[in-house]
Amino acid sequence: MSHAHDNSSGSPIARAFVEARRASRALSPYPGAQPESLDAAYQIQDEAIAAWPDRIAGWKLGRINPPHDARFGAGRLAGPIFSHAVWTAGAEPTRFDVIDGGFAAVEAEYVLELGEPAPDRDDWTAATVAPLVARVFTGVEIAGSPFAGINDHGPAVTASDFGNNAGLILGAEVADWRTRLADLTCTMTIDGAVIGKGGAASIPDGPLDSLAFLLNLLHRRGRRLEAGQLISTGAATGVHAIRAGQSAIADFGPDGRIECRAVPAQGETP
């Protein structure tokens, strides 16, 4: 998918974000003219994906709240999750990098694993995507950007920098998810204080609708989902800002808990 015609406006922004992320260096102000539409934002995102030295392991969805949803014509935005930034939760807290002067947050999420490649079409619904899902996991999305104001200028700016994603921590597999999904609940704690409560019902029309939205969006972008890819379906308890040195626990009740700790990012990443 070529965006060569748009290099004059898009590529410098994409390049600035890629270089800042790779160097773990804060970026201020926004590196160029802010995109006015989600289409323009995804062009920047696609150019940054092409420049990023890693493969896409999955995608994150984020909610677009009113009145932005009406103005931008979408209730969600998407961003790539790269393979080197997918971690499996263990007994010890999972450490993740935070860029000094940038943005970082933790989000409790339900993560869908695709069991087969998704046919290329643009009329997916929550009902029609359900057979594509092989497994569901608990997870914590690490939101992050070198630009501290990533969430302060509307969804197009957020989408332009990998949808404000900096990684995904995978927790336990959710047993019997097809019968339980709508009733799943969770809490998020930072440094011992509960700062968010919610669940799958907090995600507009549920996690499967997030997948349907993503498939329809990727169809328009000339992309597709492959078997084994992970879809982080949206913040179940909210978006909770975190600083280096702080610890968070996402508690999914009978489905386990994920502990993680923010640490200062150290220079160049591969």
Image (cartoon, rainbow, N blue to C red):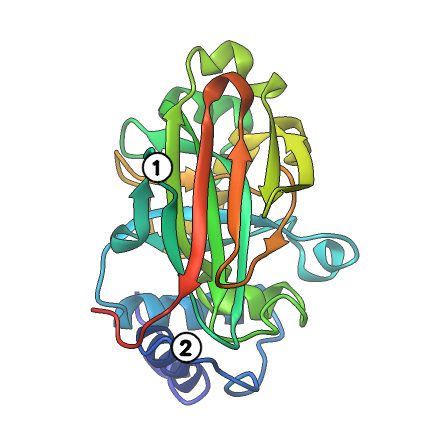
State the quadrant of the C terminus.
Answer: bottom left
Q: CA distance from mark 2 to mark 1?
A: 28 Å
Residue displayed at 63% across by 66% down: 151
Q: Quadrant of residue 192?
A: top right
Q: Amino acid at mark 2?
A: Phe
Q: Amino acid at mark 1?
A: Ala
User: Residue 253 at what x, y percent from top left?
Assistant: 55, 21
Dot 1: element: loop
Residue displayed at 58% across by 21% down: 184
Is residue 261 in view?
Answer: yes
Q: 10 Å neighbourhood of mark 1: few (<14), some, or many (≥20)?
A: many
User: Going by the image, does 82 lie left or right of 53?
Assistant: right
Dot 2: element: helix
Q: Residue furthest right?
A: 67
Q: Which residue is mark 2?
A: 17
Q: Which residue is mark 1?
A: 89
